[in-house]
Each structure stands twice: as C-alpha cells, then as structure tokens.
Amino acid sequence: MSDTILAQMQPSGLFGVFLKSLAGRFARHWAYRKTLAELEALSAHELDDLGLARGTIREVAYRSVYGTQEP
C-alpha cells in the first residue's frame, strides 16, 4: 500500500525523506499487526504444528517484520 502511495508521490528534500520514513514505518507496523492477528487466530494444534507456543506469538510476529527481537 505505502509503495503505491510513494510511487505516485515524488517528495523531495527533507520533507520527502520524512514522508518516506513515515510511510515505511506505517507499512511495517501494519504488517506486524496483520501477522500478529493471523498468528493469534490459529488454534493451539496449528501453532504446535508450526513449532510455536501462544506465548511467543508477539516475538515471532515482530521478528518476521522487523528482523530483530523486541527491545
């Protein structure tokens, strides 16, 4: 979504950098929330099949989007 918006906009200068950064943060946060919701919707059996415990869902979602462990 943000890639489409950024492709249409041609911001320049410091404001453009700010807009691109903001759009990137929004896109990553949206991806995190979507991943989290999808994992939370899985049954205990499905999570077990994936090798996950319900208590690790937030960490797994965070790592899948941001690539690092939560601070």
Image: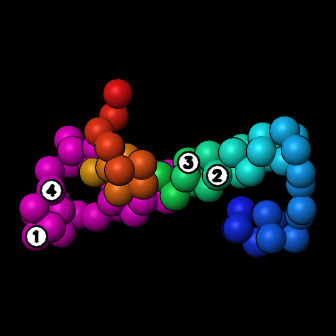
Mark 2 or mark 3, whichever is nearer to me: 2
**Range of residues picked out in magenta:** 33-59
**Label 1 CA crowd tier, 10 Å (few <14, some 14–19, many 20+):** few
Question: Taking 10 as reference, is 25 above or below it?
Answer: above
* Magenta stretch secondary structure, dominant: helix
Q: Which residue is mark 4?
A: 52
Q: Which residue is mark 1?
A: 49
Q: Is residue 15 visible?
A: yes
Q: Which residue is mark 3?
A: 29
Left or right: residue 33 versus residue 1 is left
Q: Amino acid type of disc 1?
A: Asp
Q: Which residue is mark 2?
A: 24
Left or right: residue 10 versus residue 29 is right
Q: CA distance from mark 4 to mark 2?
A: 28 Å
* Residue occupying image coordinates x 35% and y 56%: 64
Local SS, label 2: helix
Image location of residue 41, percent across then percent down:
35, 61
Question: Taking 26 as reference, is 45 above or below it?
Answer: below
Q: Amino acid type of disc 3?
A: His
